[in-house]
Image (cartoon, rainbow, N blue to C red):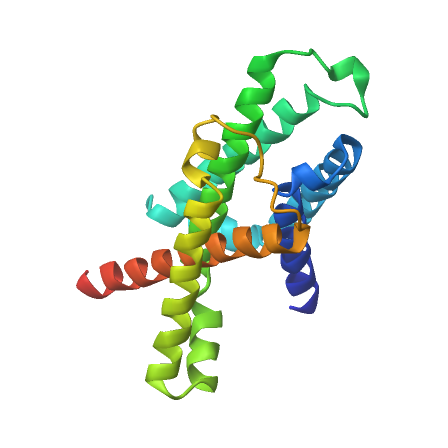
Amino acid sequence: MLKRMIVNLLLLVCTLLEFSKVYLTPEVHEIIGIVLLILMVVHVMQNRKYIQSKQKTTFNILYVTNILLFVTFITTIITGLLSSQLIPMLNIHTITTNYLHKILAYITFLLISLHLGLNINKIIITFNKKVQNPYLKHSIFIIIIIVGIISFIQLDFFNHLIGNVGFSTNNSNIIINILQYLSILLSITLITNYLDNKIKNIN
């Protein structure tokens, strides 16, 4: 359990750093990407029994999300390698590759948020047990979502998603940038978890 938590935390940190590309050198960005790939492999291996159990069931939103996440993550890595500064022989120097890399990275970010929202029930239950006051609990969730929406607007996330701009907006502070992307991720995660549980209760 502890090893899984460490890997998950490192995945989150590396992902947020990757979306702070404007503050990093291309080489550091690529190294973090390689570390991210290794961590993803470890993450899949750690959860292989869970993944195999889901493959035996009918298609559901979690299964589809995981498949899409796998595809976009791998294609993000591939398009990144095709723009590599560390491995020049792979660099094909095309605007299209860079353009696709940015779009795929942001789609992957959204899918990671959905993936977390569909898998975070245990954490939410633990949080609910520790925070007994329903008003405080709901206030925390609402604040996170509001901050996430504000960050979504401030970072011009939609234009990043469709490839109109680069990886991040320069806020002169990498910490602020990381916190803004974290708030977007958490807000999408919480909304996804809420809607998923509502749908399950209806069914």
Residue 79, percent across and down?
Answer: 62, 23
Residue pictured at 51% horizontal, 39% vertical? 108
Query: Which of the image's four quarters has the C terminus?
Result: bottom left
Q: Is residue 136 above or below residue 11?
A: below
Q: Is residue 44 above or below residue 77?
A: below
Residue pictured at 65% horizontal, 59% vertical? 9
In-image side of 167 versus 140 (left or right):
right
Residue 88 versus residue 37: which sits nearer the camera?
88
Q: How many marks?
A: 0
In-image side of 144 versus 17 (left or right):
left
Residue 131 versus residue 129: which sits nearer the camera?
131
In-image side of 142 versus 72 (left or right):
left
Residue pictured at 36% horizontal, 68% vertical? 142
Residue 12, percent across and down?
Answer: 61, 54
In-image side of 92 versus 135 (left or right):
right
Quadrant of res 121: bottom left
Residue 166, percent across and down?
Answer: 56, 30
Quadrant of res 156: top left
Q: Is residue 113 above or below residue 123?
A: above
